[in-house]
Amino acid sequence: MKILTSIQRILFFIPCCFLSANAPLYSEDLPFCMRAFSLTKKEVDAFTEKGFLVCRGLIDPDRVYSLHLRAEALIERIEPKLDPKNLDERMRYLGASVKKHRLSDTPAILLISWIGGADQLFLDAGRTPEILIKVAQLLGRNTGGSLSVDHLINQLHIKKPGDGVYFPLHQDIENRMAFDPKWRDLNGRGSFVQTLLAIDPHQEDNGPLIVYPFIKKPKTYGLSSLSDEKKRALVNDLVEKGEIGKPIKVLLEPGDVLFFHPLLVHSSEKNTSSISRKALINGFSFPGANKASYPGDGSCEHLVIEN
Ligand SMILES: O=C(O)CCC(=O)C(=O)O
Ligand SMILES: [Fe+2]
């Protein structure tokens, strides 16, 4: 085989870089039929700059109300099945996987992974064009030029009044890498977008998401290995040094959707109000970034949006 000279190698490498360059897509980069569901240039740029974006009233009230009713019905059916002696293992419910928590006296549901495995309505809600096309825009085109994503997460989060549930400071990228230690960032922008659809109002005192906007180029801070106290100390320090922005409570109305980057630092506190705070969380990865399997029947499905 002919051995390439250094100059030949450089000349070969430069066009390859351009071919595989990946960037978020603007509306005009999408087929005409998708543009009505796309993010504006201003929204794409805001997501890139801050690491999150809220789209108000994205999902129509009928659909959100149906999700609310079905979620309440599922919770009522699952709760009596929780075995107080076995709170550590996940429990299967139809094709979904229930994670329990022991933060209150009575066993309760922390979250239901791949809830679409128990009720298709939740899967369809995560894949509405209003959500999916925006996610595909943010993830960008694959090397072959197609628009496709892997649907990793379709999860119901339930925070009942006084149930004690909270999510310590974290970055979702660490969750992805905990599932797949060989996770690869293939689009150079985290290769993952998480979305949170508010089913109930997310208000000051029922444990809304708290986000720390990007200021400097985001990186992984290794929060998952620290105690809650050390996580708080590290994040306070990052805020003080101007690495990340001051915390913002993301207050939402039912139907609003938050899109966030896997390197966004975030947390949520306990629900001290008298109303539940339910959310449907959907997470999508750039194809090839994840090779692990996730709980729930049919999870990690590859969705082709445009060939
Ligand atoms: O439901 C919440 O409050 C936080 C959820 C979250 O951050 C996650 O699932 O990664
Ligand atoms: Fe998270």
Image (spheres, grey):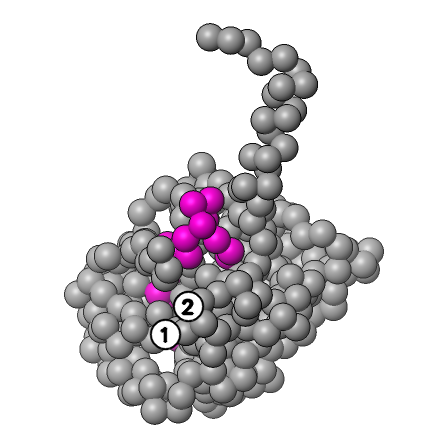
Determine the CA span between mark 1 and mark 2: 6 Å
Find residue 108 and report its image quarter.
Answer: bottom left
Residue at 57% of width from left, 58% of height from top? 24
Residue 270, compared with residue 20, is above or below; it is: below
Q: Residue 70: image x %, image y %?
A: 26, 82
- Residue indicated by mark 2: 132
Q: Residue 125: image x %, image y %?
A: 34, 75
Residue at 66% of width from left, 48% of height from top? 219
| Disc 2 CB within 8 Å of nearest ligand 1 atom | no
- Residue indicated by mark 1: 128
The type of residue carrying mark 2 is Leu
Tell me if 85 is positioned left or right of 210 in this view.
Answer: left
Magenta part of the chain: 139-158
Quadrant location of the C terminus in the rendered image:
bottom left
- Magenta span includes 4: no
The type of residue carrying mark 1 is Thr
In front: 239, or 213?
A: 213
Q: Are marks 1 and 2 in contact (CB under 8 Å)?
A: yes
Q: Secondary structure at mark 2?
A: helix
